[in-house]
Image (cartoon, rainbow, N blue to C red):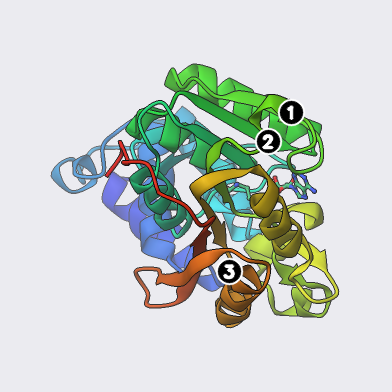
Amino acid sequence: MSPTVRDVRARTAATLAAAGVPSPTVDADALLCAVLDWRGSELATRADAALPAPATERLGELVDRRAAREPLQLVLGTTGFRHVDLMVGPGVFVPRPETEILAGEAIARTPEGGVVVEPCTGTGAVAIAVATEARPGEVHATDREAAAVDLARHNARRCGAAVSVARGDLLDPLPLRLCGSVDVLVANPPYVAEGETGQLPPEVAGWDPRSALVAGPTGHEVSDRLLALAGEWLTPGGWVLLEVAEHRAAQTAARAERIGLVEADVVRDLAGRDRVVLARRSGPARVASGA
Ligand SMILES: C[S@@+](CC[C@H](N)C(=O)[O-])C[C@H]1O[C@@H](n2cnc3c(N)ncnc32)[C@H](O)[C@@H]1O
């Protein structure tokens, strides 16, 4: 006799808990919904249904991957980010919920018809959120990894987002005509210091590419370069917004002011951790379209 959804749900959560997965019940439900093509609420209302054999087999494969601490999003192949559903894939950094704060701050500062640039785009999550939630004139994203560029282009097409994605180092691939006229420079760059990689959880250390995580010996290397680029590429009044390591946020804000940016500030995430540093080039700010 086929096991019921209720039994399989409990067994799956127990398997994931034994593997040390931090949220075994949530993840078990997500995997079951994926193989059954159900909404979460159906797991309760249809708990006595029998799990068909093909779904049981498929679930077994997915549970093995999650128990090996592959991130849930990679196992499922997609993740939600603000209002959009994005494809994720091996070799490309999986967008995190806390980065939705960064995107929200960028959206709130994007003027109608303005120019937004997002170096270090990964799946394109932030650029796509800005393009679909604000009313920018142009959104340009870059990444130096080919896999990220391909995935970001795919996601932008899928979401109907007008984002141009180019491969290269930070702002190098962008048209020079944009230099001095960028309204918002937003990035979640690599910000882990070399000596900190041992503290990363298995889902991060084993699956996110090192080039997406590690900035260099101090962790400030890429954000320092981005602050310097902000000084050159922003229009007067334009904003730079960077996701940062919690314990380097205050230093990053001080570094922004040291190179001449103004109104440097730190925004906390929902867990109360310092998460985003923002600053602007002096001059009158344009009215935002996405607030
Ligand atoms: C922490 S991930 C963030 C990805 C995405 N913005 C997000 O929040 O989900 C950093 C990304 O920066 C890219 N990257 C690292 N160094 C870069 C550089 N010098 N120029 C462009 N992209 C870079 C990595 O390939 C990776 O996709």
Q: Rounded to the nearest whole Å, what is the CA distance between mark 3 and mark 1?
A: 50 Å
**Does the beta carbon at disc 3 come under 8 Å from ligand 1?**
no
Q: Which residue is drawn at 41% across and 49% down?
A: 284
Task: Please name the residue that numbered disc 1 is placed on.
Answer: 176
Q: Rounded to the nearest whole Å, what is the CA distance between mark 2 and mark 3?
A: 50 Å
Q: Which label belongs to residue 19?
A: 3
Task: Please name the residue that numbered disc 2 is placed on.
Answer: 179
Please tell me whether residue 102 is drawn above or below residue 140 in the rendered image: below
On screen, residue 24 versus residue 165, left or right, reads: left
Name the foreground residue: 155 vs 163: 163
Compare marks 3 and 1 and give the one earlier in the sequence: 3
Q: What residue type is labelled 3?
A: Ala
Dot 2 alpha-carbon crowd within 10 angstroms: few under 14, some 14 to 19, many 20 or more: some
**Does the beta carbon at disc 1 come under 8 Å from ligand 1?**
no
Please tell me whether residue 143 is drawn above or below residue 231 in the rendered image: above
Give SS at disc 1: helix
Dot 1 alpha-carbon crowd within 10 angstroms: few under 14, some 14 to 19, many 20 or more: few
Give SS at disc 3: loop
Please tell me whether residue 213 is drawn above or below residue 256 in the rendered image: above
Query: Where does the N terminus fall, quadrant-wise?
Result: top left
Which circle, 3 or 1, is nearer the viewer? 1
